[in-house]
Image: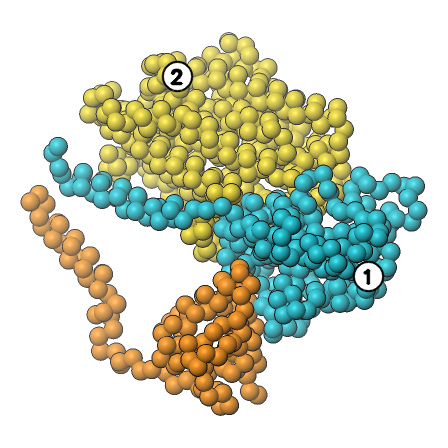
Amino acid sequence: MKSSRRKFLQIAGLSALGWSICPSLLQASGHGGGEGGNGQGVRWAMAIDTRKLDDKLMEECVHACHSIHNVPKINSKQNIKWIWSAPFEKLFPGQMHKFLKEVPEEHTLALCNHCGNPSCVRVCPTKATFKRPDGIVMMDFHRCIGCRYCMAACPYGSRSFNFADPRRFLKEQNPDFPTRTKGVVEKCTFCAERLDEGKRPACVEAAKGAIYFGDLNDPHSEVRQVLKERYSIRRKPGLGTDPSVYYLI
Amino acid sequence: MLEKAIKGSKIYWGWLGLLLAIIGVGFGAYMVQLNQGLSITGMSRDVSWGFYIAQFTFLVGVAASAVMMVIPKYLHHYQAFGRVLILGEFLAVAAVSMCLLFIVVDLGQPQRLFNVLLHPTPNSILFWDMVVLNGYLFLNILIGWVTLQAERKQVPPPSWIKPFIYLSIPWAVSIHTVTAFLYCGLPGRGFWLTAILAPRFLASAFASGPAFLILLCYIVKIFTKWDPGKEAIQSLAKIVTYAIITNLFFLGLEVFTVGYSQIPDHLLHFKYLFFGLHGYSTYVPWMWASVIAGLAAVAILLNPKNRQADNVLAFACVLVFLSCWIDKGLGMISGGFVPNPLEEITEYIPTKLELMVTLGVYAAGFFILTILYKVAVGVKKEVDA
Amino acid sequence: MYDGGKIIAGLAVFVLLFTFPFWYNIGNAAYTRPKLELPKEAKECVEKTEWMRAEHMQLLNHWRDEVVREGHREYKSMVAGKTFNKSLTKTCMKCHDNKEKFCDRCHNSLAVKPYCWDCHVAPKGEK
């Protein structure tokens, strides 16, 4: 084979390309799924008592969450919300009908469902959204590239994107919790930071008994007790996402 | 061969200058976006993908369409495509380059782009889309360049390129299939949750891509005095005819399934796009324009006499291109997000800055296309002489 | 060698450009370590000063992955076996409560711009 400068450069270029992709191919691994929800260990879950919640209480829950987590209040369609109040007919489309006593106009709380089989975790190309062993679907704001695939994948509209720098919209900041930067997706984290300190989620505390919280795998937990006693539904159960948020009717 | 790109007429340099100016404007708009975030776009919490991703989806189709010439040429030894194949391959290179640019400008944190490689996640279809798109770009540059070089030296292409050519056939199908999988694997988005999405994408790709190529052939013929050949254009026209009919047929299948089953999760999106929902009807005229343009193109193209008249064929190709562009570059993404999973309606209308960035990316693609075509046609003319 | 002159000229230009940072800075004052304001009350950091100076970025990088991704919040120090909470704001900046006079001084003189404080809230500092 006659070698020439040209050939040398071609081979050098190809080798460099090969070496550059090799390490990351070796690293390739599955999604950031944890082991939660398989019947062992803790799986955090929430049961919302729709009968006890009124507008004032819901507002307090939203305020508690959003002020602790530095969630900005943006009055546009590029808004951000971790937990919010919405009418039943929107949260449970197809399950409400006009002859239901009171219910269709009534509001209740919506938040991330921390699904047992989360589609947002499945689609994330960087494992910035992942599932912790205790079932919490977590966001790593440091790693998110802002592709918004998770927003398309979430069938509950639980995710928000920082279209602009959120600090512009924050009147007060809680110094103990980071704000976000522009260009990343965010959502409810079940107050993972509070759970790690042994506290309960902020909305649960603000709800004064209208939201139950606990370990779904522990038959004696508060949630399991209330789920045994009362009738409950979950949002869009037919999609197979296995939500961890239950609504007591 | 690149030296052919630096010798050209005033029109050539003027065109490149114009494209550079548009790229400059688009780049300026992108700088504003980098600074302000994606808040400068018309996207929202409910419609979280917009014009960028829609153009990306459409252009993947244009790129994939090169396969419609590779198959007849290399599997059936249909020689008429020998003259234009390189134009198809170089169109694919330009189209994939635009796709990659559109993905980058759509990211909220583009500087973290390489997290996709640092933390590779085979579970994510986006990971695979990155793999197949970059692979396809590489394949087309390699195949195009090597075969053109062989042609210039008037020797048969080296035998080692054959496996790459055969590989490029399923690879072309894969880029559009994987792109369809981005959408059709999502629970709770009834518009996309359909197994026929990938075939629909491919059908519209094989209509719009070759239609665009026919138009490019005419443009090349006018500006370079090099004739791609009547037979090649006529064969492409037949491909366009079959593909646009298939595309409309697939749309009909979709409409029947959602219309007859009446399941709201799937039906409401079609209602929104074609009839408007709760008073929101921005896309209605566009969607009907798409259907009518498609049907009109079929009516024209079915008659062989029309296909043989250059002007009529070019007009039909414009109709096909428009029909597919509206369907995919406008309706496909917005329609999927409206109504949102809570059955609320937030309409999406791109902003001026967003359109400027889009135009800049298109200009960059055409810049690449012009230079590659200059090289290809230069070599062809040299060989013909 | 074909085109010998052109190749040598090209190489010369390349070397010149490649070494730009070196000859550009000839004659400039030598780098002096910026004076940092250390916390008044606290006597010790999570690790030794020299180690922290060289490794704090890696340490913080590990901390954030371990806290966010694994939920491990306790850091066992190499000095005296003490444990600390892995937190930029709750641990580091409780003592180093003046970002301008500590973090920024070094970062500025080295022209690095860490984006930590795009999200993490810096303490107000002394008034």
In which chain is the residue bearing label 1? A
The residue under the point 25% across, 78% down is C28
Indicate left or right for A249 with B32 as reference: right
Indicate left or right for A142 with A54 as reference: left
Chain rendered orange: C
How many numbered callouts? Answer: 2
Indicate left or right for B161 with B125 as reference: left
User: Which quadrant would residue A170 be assigned to in this image?
Assistant: bottom right
Q: Is residue B38 visible?
A: no
On the image, the x and y values in percent for residue B336 come to 65, 38
| Residue corresponding to mark 1 | A210
In which chain is the residue bearing label 2? B
Kindly identify the amino acid type of the residue bearing the numbered disc 2: Pro
Q: Colour of chain B?
A: yellow
Q: Residues within 10 Å of mark 2 (few under 14, many from 20)?
A: some
The residue under the point 68% across, 69% down is A199
The residue under the point 49% across, 87% down is C42
Chain rendered cyan: A
Q: Secondary structure at mark 2?
A: helix
On the image, the x and y values in percent for residue A50 come to 83, 55
The residue under the point 12% across, 32% down is A1
| Residue corresponding to mark 2 | B72
User: Image height check: is A166 above or below B293?
Assistant: below
